[in-house]
Amino acid sequence: MRVDTVLLFILGVVVVALGLLVSIALHEWGHYYPAKKFGVYISQFMIGFGPTLFSRRKGDTEYGIKAIPLGGYVAMAGMYAPQGPDKKTETSTTGFFDQVVGEPSLTETATEVEIDSRSFYRLPLHRRIIIMLGGPVMNLFIAIVLYAVVLMGFGVPSLSLTVGSVSECVVPASESRTECLPDDPAAPGAAAGLLPGDQILSVAGEDLDEWFRLTEVIRTSPGRPVDVVVDRGGAVVQLSVTPLLSERYAFDESGEILVDEAGNPVVEYVGFVGIGSSVENQRQSVSTVLPAVWDNVVGVVRVIATLPQRLVDVAQAAFGPEERDPNGPLSVVGVGRIAGEIASVESLAVRDRIASLVGIVASLNVALFVFNLIPLLPLDGGHVAVGLYEGVKRRLYRVLGKKDPGPVNASSLIPVTLVVVVILGGMSLLLMYADIVNPIRLFS
């Protein structure tokens, strides 16, 4: 492998890693900002986990960076309500591991009484939900912005109205050869004088805005002359092309060849000219951004909903001869590998590589958004679920005329939380191993 290819591979990994790190930092800021506004005592705002590399205290809060940049947390007082009146308020975090056990509150700058009065659990329910949803919503916002950059700034590969290829002859659909034989009829497009690079302006007197409309007119006009106007190097050229009646395989909506009851391919007879479109990046409108994000959200939900079976498939691919599912789950190792592969492939233009890397970071933010909404502790969705349960319980007690039961003792769920952590940790290790020994490759 060439040195420049290796450097580009490393650059792709670094770009996506930095994008993920910034996304995690903004996720935690999404928790931090509303918590600070609502007066919650925050002892730490950290990016990463493990040993602290750098930190600085400002007011009540210590801000810093830790050695392993694969997470982050905001340490807030009273994320878990005290288990009894004599129990002290603990500082737990939004981080994946730290909030499992909690840690003693820092009292260098605040008394225990003040910390307790500024505890998370004392906030009204709607404010607690705002704080916990702040992180995932921030990831969703990042994804929307990055999708807008990709779709509206870089564009997506689409069929343009520029002629990319012109066939010399007509080859029957039942034959797989690409060379022309002497007795093959001339392709109508070449006979009419169409050339690669021509930009189609109109067909049959109809102005065009997409290639598919041109294809539709040609397919329904066999044997009839069709006027075609093209822009050739700035000059408007008028041509007449007569589509040839030709046999072609019929395709369904998913692009698969249709077959009859006997299993034979279905052949249809349509007009044929013998020209192909040039694929170009075309900027999309703002209306395409949210549907694209939604499609990604739906895709992640489907992966999570079928995760047990998908993990079985990953294990079989990691420890057996099976191939990896290109649409299956990945670890950070697999994502980094794909990013490096995209950055180093020479067949892609530089702008396409950049767009792909931005798209990867956007997809990671969608995954963080959906994953953190799962209603299990220690995820953000777990805290929201506990809060909603507490709200319903308190309202029910009030309706029944009973004494307010007080905050839910979420710390009693810590054993379940530990099980979730172990399962997710095992899943991460399995995916990392699979991404090393049998990775998903895009270009090989």
Image (tube, rainbow, N blue to C red):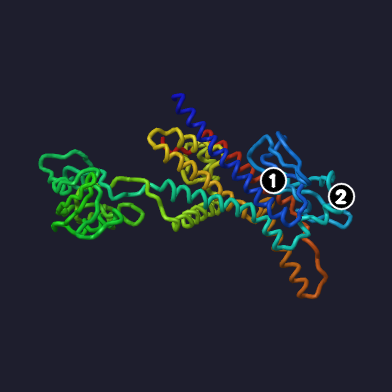
Residue at the spot 66% in from the left edge and 48% down from the top edge: 28
Residue 442 image offset from top left, x and y in percent: 43, 39
Q: Which residue is mark 2?
A: 111
Q: Residue furthest front?
A: 234
Residue 364 image offset from top left, x and y in percent: 54, 46
Q: Which residue is mark 1?
A: 73
Residue 228 relative to residue 87: left or right:
left
Q: The N terminus appears in which quarter of the rendering?
A: top left
Residue at the spot 50% in from the left edge and 45% down from the top edge: 328
Any part of residue 438 in sight? no
Q: Earlier in the sequence, mark 1 or mark 2?
A: 1
Q: Are marks 1 and 2 in contact (CB under 8 Å)?
A: no
Residue 330 relative to residue 416: left or right:
left
Q: Nearer the viewer, residue 235 or 367?
A: 235
Q: The C terminus appears in which quarter of the rendering?
A: top left
Residue at the spot 45% in from the left edge and 37% down from the top edge: 342
| Quadrant position of residue 352 | top left
Give the spatial CA distance, label 1 vs label 2.
23 Å
Q: Nearer the viewer, residue 353 or 408?
A: 353
Q: Nearer the viewer, residue 423 or 380?
A: 380
Residue 353 image offset from top left, x and y in percent: 44, 39
Q: How many marks?
A: 2
The amino acid on which the numbered mark 2 sits, given as a three-letter code, is: Thr
For label 2, the crowd category at 10 Å Cα-Cα, with few meaning under 14, some 14 to 19 and many 20 or more, is few
Q: Nearer the viewer, residue 418 or 245?
A: 245
Residue 37 image offset from top left, x and y in percent: 72, 55
